[in-house]
């Protein structure tokens, strides 16, 4: 679901890089407010690598299998480190696998990174409302995972359909976007369920990973 | 990793190009290509890309192998765009109508895509990946991002091997992920969770090892890593002029 090179006009590419620059600056500012930001860098880096590898896990949905985006889960676990982690992961994917692109790196980082940060804040609401049992944690993790992917899907189709360099009928454009977003609802549910299952696993095995 | 470094040993002017100059110049070219919308500029763009790829002496098979994954994207838009976008029908067979606007959009997207991808391969296929990251750091990439990038790159391969080993162990214990079920999803989530826990535990050891080696205390020596020669600056200047040429030509042709 990455936007490849060549498909978007220069104005959107520049806007994508500008947004990514701004959000990266804000994330780094938040990171520097940590008590010991240096200590968190190896943790965030190795988790970035682990997330990169975990996205290779395929979920069987016969007759095909799908791989997950995990941006909601990234936000849930890494907090403000999620945005740099996503930026780095997308850069590696563009350079190593030609998945996504160098010119669209800013747009893709915005598309996956901002929903990840929103997912982080959504998951933190669970602590704020004081419901730290597994049912509430699982529910908030589900919403973070499904919502993170859902927002990315909406941004993806809005950008791709409205920027195809040819005239499309506005009504058809709207219908195509609605149709494609609706077609992704099952994937959002799978992503949400997977995020909830991983979060509950971590809650049992390594709860400090969820205490960002 | 992943064969990207396979041809960094070659000797070509692009391989010898100082990494920072190369990074700035080829990124400028990539953005200039992304700026192009006029079809008349596409042959020039292809020509420039061929010249740079030829000068880099990278084999054609390197590029073709890298096109395998994006090939799915190309196939998808080649099927969708010319038959669904536009009003002017230039060929029809039953309900299938080939439309001019869709076909032109397809040509533009595919050409831009291939040229940008090729220049990206020239950029990262002619120097070790770590050298490219160090060049980015020298150009002002924030230290947090550079450190995260270097550390993540170091551990991706190891975690990939860990994942393979864990998946083999699961299969040996009888796990078959051939249908979608709650149990399978929970097992696969535990697999991902185990990978995260392992990486977290390892990160604590890595941090202690880094502290012992003076992480955060030793001043950076980034300015001593690379040395710029006159030929590097000439390459940078020529490429930037070419990139600017595309932007200026696009603006003139759009306003004409």
Image (cartoon, coloured by chain):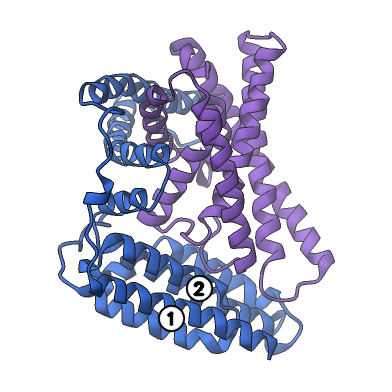
Chain B shade in the render: blue
A191 w.r.t. B29: above or below:
above
Colour-to-chain, purple: A
Can you tell which quarter of the image residue B235 is in?
bottom left
Give the Cα separation between the discs numbered 1 and 2: 9 Å
x and y, in percent, of residue B81 in the image: 63, 73
Mark 1 Cα shell of 10 Å, populated few (<14), some (14-19), many (≥20) = some
Residue occupied by mark 2 = B32
Q: Are marks 1 and 2 in contact (CB under 8 Å)?
A: yes
**Is residue B113 found left or right of B87 in the rendered image?**
left
Residue drawn 39% across and 49% down? Answer: A92
Residue drawn 47% across and 13% down? Answer: A208
Direction right: furthest residue: A171
**Is residue A48 found left or right of B37 in the rendered image?**
left
Of residues A49 and B183, the one drawn nearer to the viewer in this rendering: A49
Residue occupied by mark 1 = B242
Mark closer to the chain start, 1 or 2 = 2
Label 1 marks a residue whose chain is B
Q: Which mark is residue B254?
A: none
Label 2 marks a residue whose chain is B
Count numbered badges in the picture. Answer: 2
A118 w.r.t. B102: above or below:
above
Badge 1 marks a residue whose secondary structure is helix
Of residues B92 and A180, the one drawn nearer to the viewer in this rendering: A180
x and y, in percent, of residue B190 in the image: 44, 22
- Decide if residue A32 is in sight here: yes
């Amino acid at each position: 679901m990455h936007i490849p090179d060549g498909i978007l006009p220069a104005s959107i590419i520049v806007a994508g890089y500008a947004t990514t620059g701004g959000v990266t600056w804000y994330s780094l500012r938040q990171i520097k407010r940590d008590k010991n930001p240096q200590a968190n860098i190896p943790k965030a880096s190795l988790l970035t690598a682990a997330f990169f590898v975990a996205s290779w896990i395929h979920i069987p949905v016969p007759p095909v299998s799908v791989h997950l985006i995990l941006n909601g889960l990234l936000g849930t676990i890494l907090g403000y480190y999620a945005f740099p982690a996503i930026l780095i992961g997308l850069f590696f994917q563009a350079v190593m696998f030609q998945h996504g692109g160098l010119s669209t790196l800013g747009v893709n980082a915005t598309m996956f990174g901002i929903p990840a940060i929103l997912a982080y804040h959504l998951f933190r609401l669970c602590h704020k409302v004081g419901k730290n049992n597994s049912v509430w944690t699982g529910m908030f993790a589900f919403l973070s995972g499904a919502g993170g992917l859902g927002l990315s899907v909406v941004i993806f189709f809005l950008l791709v359909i409205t920027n195809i360099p040819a005239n499309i009928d506005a009504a058809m454009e709207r219908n195509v976007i609605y149709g494609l977003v609706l077609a992704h609802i099952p994937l959002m549910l799978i992503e949400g369920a997977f995020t909830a299952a991983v979060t509950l696993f971590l809650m049992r095995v390594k709860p400090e990973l969820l205490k960002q | 990793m992943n064969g990207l470094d396979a041809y960094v040993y070659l000797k070509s002017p692009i391989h010898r190009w100082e990494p920072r100059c190369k990074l700035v110049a080829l990124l400028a070219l990539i953005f200039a290509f992304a700026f192009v919308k006029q079809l008349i500029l596409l042959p020039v763009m292809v020509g420039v890309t061929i010249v740079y790829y030829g000068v880099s002496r990278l084999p054609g098979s390197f590029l073709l192998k890298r096109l395998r994954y994006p090939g799915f994207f190309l196939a998808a838009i080649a099927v969708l765009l010319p038959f669904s976008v536009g009003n002017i029908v230039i060929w029809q067979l039953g309900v299938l109508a080939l439309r001019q606007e869709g076909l032109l959009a397809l040509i533009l997207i595919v050409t831009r895509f291939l040229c940008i991808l090729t220049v990206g391969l020239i950029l990262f296929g002619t120097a070790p990946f770590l050298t490219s990251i160090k060049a980015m750091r020298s150009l002002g990439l924030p230290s947090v991002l550079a450190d995260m990038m270097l550390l993540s790159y170091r551990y991706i391969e190891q975690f990939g091997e860990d994942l393979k080993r864990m998946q083999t162990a699961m299969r040996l214990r009888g796990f078959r992920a051939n249908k979608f079920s709650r149990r399978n999803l929970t097992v696969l989530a535990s697999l991902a969770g185990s990978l995260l826990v392992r990486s977290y535990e390892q990160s604590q050891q890595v941090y202690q090892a880094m502290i012992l080696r003076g992480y955060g205390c030793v001043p950076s020596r980034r300015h001593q890593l690379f040395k710029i020669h006159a030929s590097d600056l000439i390459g940078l200047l020529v490429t930037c002029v070419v990139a600017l040429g595309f932007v200026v030509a696009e603006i003139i042709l759009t306003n004409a």
